[in-house]
Image (spheres, rainbow, N blue to C red):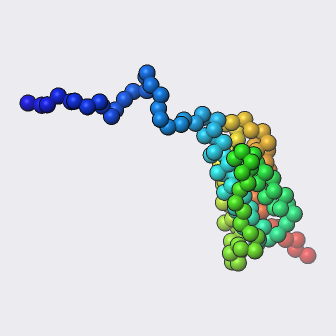
Amino acid sequence: MYEPIRTKSVHSTMAGGTSDFPHRSREEELDIQLAGHLAALLAVTDELRALAPSTGLDTAADRLAEQVARLRGGQTPARVPVAAARPEPHMAALHRRAHTLAGRALVVAASRADTAVAILTAERMDAHAAALEPREFASH
């Protein structure tokens, strides 16, 4: 009733053969993921720098760019020119987004035991959390 299969199966098992596509190690995958989180955090930091320039944000952006380049094997990250940011201020939303991105990067940095990035992202989380706290005005 059925004709026998005459060609080699396209389905195979991993046993007994090598694949034609490269596999990355867990460490390499974590490096890629961490570099992506840090690059996203860098983009938000550059946008915050455009809206409210400060030496603290400049230093943070430089440190983030350095870590992204390190994780990408020396390839420098794309940067948003400070003057090209949107003119309407969305400071609180940007700080919330940066805090979230820093948290994601911290989780990945902790899982791969990258102390330098863990410290940097924890500092950024603290800085963005502080920026979101309501300002207390002295009533005199």
**Farthest residue toward the top?**
16
> Residue 120: where, in percent of width, then height?
79, 48
- 5 left or right of 91? left
Q: Which residue is drawn at 81% across and 53% down?
A: 63
Q: Which residue is drawn at 76% across and 54% down?
A: 65
- 3 left or right of 48? left
> Residue 22: where, in percent of width, then height?
53, 37
**Farthest residue toward the bottom?**
87
The quadrant holding residue 79 is bottom right
Q: Is residue 84 above or below residue 31?
A: below
Q: Which residue is drawn at 67% across and 66% down?
A: 93
The quarter in which the N terminus is drawn is top left
The quarter in which the C terminus is drawn is bottom right
> Residue 56: where, in percent of width, then height?
85, 60
The quadrant holding residue 90 is bottom right
Closer to the camera, 6 or 123? 6
Closer to the camera, 49 or 79? 79
